[in-house]
């Protein structure tokens, strides 16, 4: 078995165990926190009889292990139950809201990579100079303020004072795009509607930048620190003595070994953005899963809480597996050491 | 690979800048917002967003009269009856969006469906024993007991298209399966002036004019209405300032409404259906003593409370209360008899109170989801401290509050609540709050047990004579002032900041107001400039 396949199999096995643990934990926690989900769902005017009927229908009168049994039975049929918040199947809600969040997080992740890594490289290459200082200041600003603060600042500057970007939503009202993948940037291209693609790109820019700024700062700082450490290695001295250009040394010899810790952090940041996206989604009225997740927690919508947490956990685990595989692919020592063992 | 990633990013950035000029909006579109989620199944409608949807996508047998008490025919041509029997004659020219003609069978089906689903405001019809179609255009309701506000409650019985719903029954047990719940959560089957274009309960519902509507709809009425959900205050403010939104929800903080008004937004209002109540747990010492309660009622600074919710010199999110019943509702005191702080009276009552001020330790709760209530808690703490009364402020999330009030011993001394009448009738407002049989719900943390109050509430509920009802509610109002289970904070007014391109007579002209929460947003009666 190839080392990559072995790593993948091992990670998948661990991930399944983690998911099972998360499902049990969130299932129990959601039921222990105070508040009657049936009362909240039916609203303040519902009678005691209506509340009792709904409690019975949701099996809330049974013990938690019995309720978990019902949950597993339904889950085996791909049924996460009905959301008391939207009155729709949870799977339908997740299918509708997840692509919006994933699209936002993917674009933010892309920005992290295309902005964070080059900034780190530049900063390390011009260590101590003006460029380095400017980049360090930008990075510090990025990491020191949370995403929602950036969201408000960006909205104020680029939507309120300089109305260059839209304030809310994923696309302008004038476009009607049939959902295929749920990713508007993809669906607009599938529809061959480039004006709509441009409009969707225009809408995603501010929320994605707000979400990515902290990660960009973190990636740049980490890349810089690792590259500076790498610059002290003898092989860099040797490359210099051969007369290689500083650009070539930075991009080819110093950057690649420094990429591994940066990649790990980017992977973790990417997964964390799924949760952090909530306030950014709220500010830009982005109809995503994070906003949905918080809304269902506040309303103690048990089925939706469990469904949302499971999906976010699964995405987190998938992101980690991808990062592990990438690191194994980039770093021959990992592959070789595993082969040797 | 790296180059292609960079190219894609560059393409997105470039296209995002190039796309900027596309922000043109089609004319005649009304854009408003509310808290999520929007429920389009009329049998489950309960909150303000649901009401806006229901009043535009569906119709009811009667409508509240504009600017005056009483009800006018709508889907019904006329009605007769009182006590336990009501017979309605329906219009014969009303069609659903499907093209099906509306008949008495649809009314029967709508009521049976609402009761079977048992959600939303279905409790209003628990007293209906039987509903039958006498002929295609006559429907008869038989009630278990006399219920005077029955006609008023019909504003919450939207009529659905039986034939269409029966064609779309989903999974479920029994002959009626799911009563079309799954289908009606995505589609409409009403006669309303508007029909659904798209619906996402967390994001937006888009509606457009129904060309087959049975009444004439003015040209100036919005061609399309977009109800957005869950927008943040900062987002709404920016959207309105940029001309990308028309009417903000009533849930904006007063400061934001004030700043929008300062920037030129008009302020629309809707009131007369509810009030802000500071409810005292009458089972818990020292508030089981009426003198202690009266001391607190007199010490409360009513003028400061109204000032705290004022937006401009002339508009506020409430007006001074005159008693337990909001001004404009049956049994209310005249608008000029406003409640005022009276520290001398407060001290006199406190002197008769069995508990000494230093022994008070009141729990002043506020609902975590309503930040405004924290300010009132602080106001009360300061007011009561002037009498030497100690108190402790406690923040309670709604879910926890709803749990706690189910037992008197767990219910805080003081709870703050905004309560509205969902039918516009005082019965719907007061019975659930003060009748001893209704104690222990979110509306009745007072746990009031008073025979006179019960008797007057029953009289108001069952009397067929309007004058007798008025007298019963006036007497009830007086009694509730005497025994002070509640501090009647202020009469609630919903304030909406709106762009000048919108005209909404039902929200700006008292002679056109419906006196029913959400009905001011009847789109066919609104105008939107191109």
Image (cartoon, coloured by chain):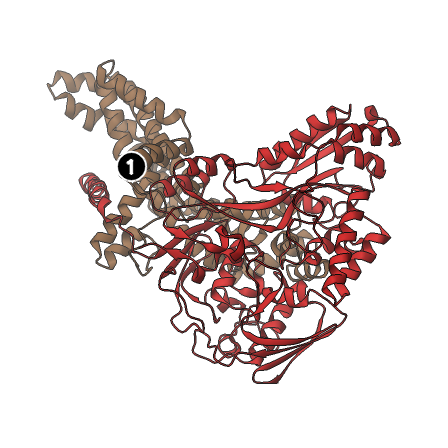
Question: Do we see residue B37 in this rendering?
Answer: no
Image coordinates for residue B148, horizontal then vertical, percent: 72, 66
Q: Which residue is disc 1 drawn over?
A: A111
Image coordinates for residue B456, horizontal then vertical, percent: 80, 56
| Residue at x-position 68% and y-position 32% | B301
Residue in front for this viewpoint, B304 or A20: B304
- Extreme bottom residue here? B135
Q: Chain of mark 1?
A: A
Element on which disc 1 rests? helix
| Residue at x-position 59% and y-position 33% | B307
Q: Colour of chain A?
A: brown
Image coordinates for residue B446, horizontal then vertical, percent: 77, 45
Q: Colour of chain B?
A: red
Residue in front for this viewpoint, A131 or A22: A131
Q: Is residue B301 left or right of residue B207?
A: right
Image coordinates for residue B403, horizontal then vertical, percent: 70, 46
């Amino acid at each position: 078995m190839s080392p990559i396949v072995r790593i993948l199999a091992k990670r998948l096995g661990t991930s399944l165990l983690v998911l099972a643990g998360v499902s049990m934990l969130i299932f129990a926690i959601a039921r222990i926190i105070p508040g009657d989900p049936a009362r909240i769902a039916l609203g303040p005017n519902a009678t005691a009889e209506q509340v009792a009927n709904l409690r019975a229908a949701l099996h809330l009168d049974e013990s938690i292990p019995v309720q978990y049994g019902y949950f597993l039975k339904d889950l085996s049929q791909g049924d996460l139950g009905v959301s008391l918040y939207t009155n729709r199947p949870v799977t339908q809600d997740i299918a509708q809201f997840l692509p919006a969040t994933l699209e936002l997080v993917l674009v933010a992740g892309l920005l992290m990579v295309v902005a964070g890594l080059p900034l780190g490289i530049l900063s390390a290459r011009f260590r101590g100079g003006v460029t380095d200082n400017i980049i360090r200041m930008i990075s510090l600003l990025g990491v020191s303020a949370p995403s929602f603060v950036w969201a408000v600042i960006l909205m104020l500057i680029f939507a309120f004072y300089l109305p260059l970007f839209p304030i809310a939503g994923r696309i302008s009202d004038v476009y009607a795009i049939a959902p295929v993948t749920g990713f508007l940037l993809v669906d607009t291209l599938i529809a061959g509607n480039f004006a709509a693609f441009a409009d969707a790109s225009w809408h995603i820019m501010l929320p994605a930048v707000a979400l990515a700024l902290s990660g960009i700062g973190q990636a740049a700082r980490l890349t810089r620190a690792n590259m500076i450490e790498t610059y002290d290695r003898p092989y860099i001295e040797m490359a210099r003595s051969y007369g290689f250009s500083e650009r070539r040394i930075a991009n080819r010899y110093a950057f690649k070994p420094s990429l591994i810790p940066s990649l790990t952090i980017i992977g973790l940041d990417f997964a964390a953005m799924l949760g952090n996206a909530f306030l950014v989604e709220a500010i830009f009225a982005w109809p995503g899963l994070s906003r949905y997740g918080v809304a269902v927690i506040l309303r103690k919508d048990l089925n939706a809480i469990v469904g949302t947490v499971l999906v976010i956990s699964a995405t987190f685990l998938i992101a980690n597996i991808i990062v592990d595989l990438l690191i194994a692919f980039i770093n021959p020592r990992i592959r070789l050491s595993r082969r040797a063992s | 690979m790296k180059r292609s990633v960079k190219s894609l990013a560059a393409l997105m950035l470039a296209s995002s800048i190039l796309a900027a000029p596309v922000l043109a909006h089609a004319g005649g579109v009304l854009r408003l917002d509310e808290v999520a989620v929007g429920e389009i199944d009329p049998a489950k409608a309960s909150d303000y967003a649901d009401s806006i949807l229901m009043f535009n996508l569906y119709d009811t047998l009667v409508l509240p009269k504009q600017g005056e008490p009483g009800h006018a025919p709508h889907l019904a041509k006329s009605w007769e009856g009182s006590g336990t029997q009501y017979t309605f004659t329906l219009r014969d020219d009303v069609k659903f969006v499907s093209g099906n003609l509306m008949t008495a069978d649809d009314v029967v089906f709508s009521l049976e469906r609402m009761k079977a689903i048992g959600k939303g405001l279905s409790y209003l019809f628990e007293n209906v024993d039987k509903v039958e179609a006498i002929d295609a255009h006559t429907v008869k309701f038989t009630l278990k007991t006399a219920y005077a506000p029955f006609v008023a409650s019909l504003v919450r019985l939207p009529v659905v298209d039986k034939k269409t719903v029966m064609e779309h029954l989903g999974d479920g047990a029994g002959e009626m399966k799911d009563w079309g719940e799954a289908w009606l959560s995505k589609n409409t089957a009403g006669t309303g002036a508007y029909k659904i274009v798209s619906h996402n309960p967390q994001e937006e519902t888009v509606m457009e004019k129904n060309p087959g509507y049975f009444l004439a709809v003015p040209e100036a009425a919005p061609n399309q209405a977009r109800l957005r959900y869950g927008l943040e205050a900062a987002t709404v403010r920016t959207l309105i300032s940029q001309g990308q939104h028309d009417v903000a929800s009533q849930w904006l903080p007063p400061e934001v409404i004030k700043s929008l008004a300062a920037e030129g937004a008009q302020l629309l209002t809707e009131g007369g259906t509810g009030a802000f109540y500071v409810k005292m747990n009458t089972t818990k010492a020292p508030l089981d003593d009426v003198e202690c309660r009266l001391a607190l009622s007199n010490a409360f600074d009513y003028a400061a409370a109204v000032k705290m919710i004022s937006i401009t010199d002339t508009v506020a999110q409430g007006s001074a209360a005159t008693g337990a019943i909001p001004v404009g509702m049956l049994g209310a005191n005249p608008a000029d008899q406003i409640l005022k702080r009276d520290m001398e009276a407060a001290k006199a009552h406190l002197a008769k109170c069995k508990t000494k001020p230093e022994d008070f330790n009141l729990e002043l709760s506020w609902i975590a989801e309503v930040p405004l209530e924290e300010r009132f808690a602080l106001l009360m703490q300061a007011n009561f401290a002037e009498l030497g009364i100690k108190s402790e402020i406690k923040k309670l999330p709604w879910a926890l509050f709803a749990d706690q009030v189910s037992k008197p011993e767990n219910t805080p001394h003081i709870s703050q609540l905004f309560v509205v009448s969902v039918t516009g009738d005082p019965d719907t407002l007061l019975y659930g709050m003060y009748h001893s049989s209704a104690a222990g719900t979110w509306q009745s943390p007072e746990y009031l047990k008073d025979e006179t109050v019960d008797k007057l509430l029953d009289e108001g509920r069952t009397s067929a004579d309007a004058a007798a009802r008025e007298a019963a509610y006036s007497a009830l109002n007086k009694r509730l002032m005497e025994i002070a289970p509640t501090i009647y904070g202020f009469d609630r007014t919903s304030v909406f900041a709106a762009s000048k391109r919108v005209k909404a007579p039902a929200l700006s002209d008292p002679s056109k107001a419906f006196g029913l929460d959400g009905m001011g947003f009847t789109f066919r009666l609104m105008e939107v400039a191109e």
